[in-house]
Structures are given as structure tokens and as C-alpha cells.
Image: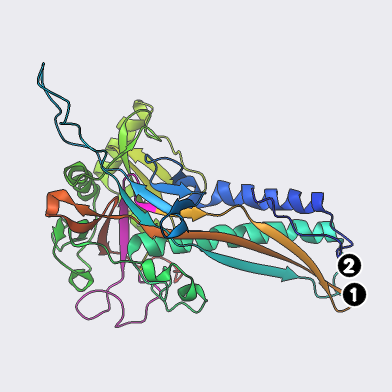
Amino acid sequence: MATDYPSTSFNIGLNTTDIQYFQKKAWKAMRVASLADQLAGAGAGAAITRITELTNTEWGYQAILTLVPDDTTFGVVGDNRLKDNERGLTSYDQTVTFDQFRKAFKTEGQMADRSSWIRFAGQAADQLSFWGRDIKDRLLINTLSGISYDTEVNGAARTSQFPQCRFAADVSAPSANRYFIINDSGTLESGKATGDVSSKSVPSWNTFIDMRTELPLMRIKPLRGQWGNGRDLYICLVHPRTMGLIKKDTTFQQNWRDALSRGEGNVLFRGAESYMVDGILIISHRYVYNTLGAASGSKWGSGGTVDGTRSLFLGAQAIGMVEMGGPVWVPDEDDYKNNHSISQRIRFGFKKAVWPDQWMGDSDEDFGVVAVDHYLPTGATTYS
């Protein structure tokens, strides 16, 4: 929790204790409900590596994401000499940039709003908490999906200032060997693009199992025991309509029933529908990238008219997230203390982890995320 609480000498209604209380309330609510915060951990075993301290480097203090691939060398046997045959610990450092985000709410005036400062602060805490987790989750999905911040998570043009943030330029498209589509036969295929997605590119649970089978071969590190009751697992983020398709799949239904009988298929994730089946923790989230909000001609398929979505398979250290302290509140009064306002600032940043993949000739590949593009059906509503 940030400790640089603002001075309250100008503020009649809230003292420092009040501010600390509502800051903590907003931060706790953000941590509980945010997808980014739930996937984050301090070590190398979480899908999101949380960075909260700067490292002193030769270029100054920076937020560093250290990638640690599994070592596959063999050591020595018996009494063979180990001296001079030591293996250096292999790691790759990446700098993660962060920026400041601010938002404020204000009352309309003493006559329009006669509620107390405390009541107003409580209402603002709820809204500022939602705002904080909302922008983090949107930018998380943009970054993992390799979608520019100019584009919303539903494919529409973004009208906010997000493209101006300092880490917007760090967004990179899925690397060549970490990108697949589901083809017209319902199977995974590499070397394609969004223009190759059609209305026949429908996912099945068998397709997801095929992807799960490939992930260890691609050296995507699993989440070892974090949610899997001691088992290695991978996370799959899907759009709610993709989850709807999967839940109707008879193979999924049977495998989930089997998992429940073993005590492994329980819904484990706060704030989202989730299931753990066949070593996959599949999580439904409405911000998973899709084209429902894109204009006709700018969607996917050969004519740009096919709606699609980008499901994401995550292993360990898929992305780095910098958090420089918790939310900081600054209350203010204007127009001769007739209007009350409260602002909140948060500082964070994302960078998708990329490394020189030694199994692919040291080509730059995404370290812990694989993108799978496929068809997304139209629902009963026009919401996107």
C-alpha cells in the first residue's frame, strides 16, 4: 500500500485516517475482482509476474522482468569432473515500463448533493475500484493478445488516452510459433492469419486438448501446483460465448463430470466462470479479444465480415506487470468549497515476455502465451 498520503490541511470532511481507509477499501476490491491481480504472483511460477520494486541497473533504476526457462543440460555422471563443467544459470531480463493513470469524481454542489463527505467517499471508492481493475484488465488483454491500444477489446476503435501511455509501444503481435487458428476442419493450424478464419472455424474441447498437448513440447512452462492441487496446468482465457460452445461439447461435459468425481473440477476463480478439466483451467472473461465491435469489413475472414475471438493459453511468466504502490487518493474542494471531488491515481505497466527460443533457432518467441483465433458466434443480444 502506498504511504505517500496527501496532506489534508485543505480538506474539511476527510482526515488522513479516512483517506487511508478508503484507499485500502478500493485497493482490496481491485485485488479481489481484477483478472490481472488474480493471475499475478511474485515468483516465476505465476502466469503474471508482479514487479513492485525497481532494480538498480547500469541504465538507472528500472522495473525488470527476469525470465527463467527450465534448464535441460545433463550434468555429469559418477566421478567425472564437475569442476569447470558448471552450468551458468540461464535467465533473460526485460525492462517493463509503467505509467500513471488518474480518475476523479465530484459532486454537483451543496444544493444538488447534501450527502456527507464520508458517504460521497464511500460511493467514490466503489467506482474508483471498478475503474482501476477495469483499465488494468483491458490493457492486460490487449497486451497478451498483441492488439494495439488503439483498438478496444471488442475490436472497436478506442477513444481513450490509453494509446498515449508509456508502455503502449511495447505491445507485440503473437510470435510466429505461438499463433494458431482453428481451420474449417476444426483443427489447429499454424502459419495462417485472421483472414483465414471462417464461420466453420468452431472450437471443440478436443481442439483445446490438442493445444494443451502441444504446450509442453513448445517449452511453455506450466503453472506448477498454483491452482491444480499439485498438478501442472495451463490457463485458457476464453470469451463467454466460447465458453458457451465448450459447455455444450459432449466431450467436455463427460470430462468435467470425471474431474468432479476426483475433486478436481471445482469452480476456483473469483468473479468469473471457470472450470479445471484435463490440466486446463479455462476461465471465461468478457474482455477476451473479439471483433464484435468492429465495423463490417474490419472483422476477420477473407472479406472482413466474420466475427472471431482470440483465446489465450497461458503458462508461467506469460507477462510482466509493474505495480508501483497501491491507489493514492487526493480529495479536493472547488468553488468556495461548494463542490467536493476525489481523485485516484494508480501506477502500473505491462510487457509480454519474449525470449530467444533455443528450440526454434533462437528466434524471438512469446515466452508463456499462445494465441488461438477462431470463430465467435453471434449471441441472442447485440452486446459486445
Asked whether 372 falls inside the magenta stretch, the response is no
Instruction: Decide: is 287 above or below 306.
Output: above
Quadrant of image for the C terminus: bottom left
Cα distance between the residues tagged 2 and 1: 6 Å
The residue singled out by tag 2 in the image is 114
The range drawn in magenta is: 291-319
Would you call the spot at circle 2 few (<14 residues within 10 Å), some (14-19), or many (20 or more)?
A: few
Mark identifier at residue 170: none
Q: Is residue 370 left or right of 37 when viewed as pictured?
A: left
Callout 2, which amino acid? Arg
Is the C-beta separation of discs 2 and 1 under 8 Å?
Answer: yes
Q: Can residue 286 be seen in this view?
A: no
Left or right, residue 68 beside residue 101 = left
Image coords of residue 238 (percent x, y): 36, 55
- In this view, the residue in front, 19 or 258, is 19
SS at circle 2: loop
Tell me the tag on residue 111: 1
x and y percent of residue 324 in the render?
Answer: 56, 54
Q: In this view, does 192 lie to the left or right of 33?
A: left
Residue depicted at 12% across the width and 24% down the height: 76
Q: What element carries label 1?
A: loop
Q: What residue type is labelled 1?
A: Met
The image shows residue 308, relative to residue 302, as above or below, that is: above
Number of marks drawn? 2
How crowded pointer 1 is (Cα within 10 Å; few <14, some 14-19, many 20+) is rated as few
* 275 up-or-down from 318: above or below: above
Indicate whether 342 appears above or below 26. below
| Point 11% across, 54% down: residue | 361
Residue 296 on the magenta segment: yes
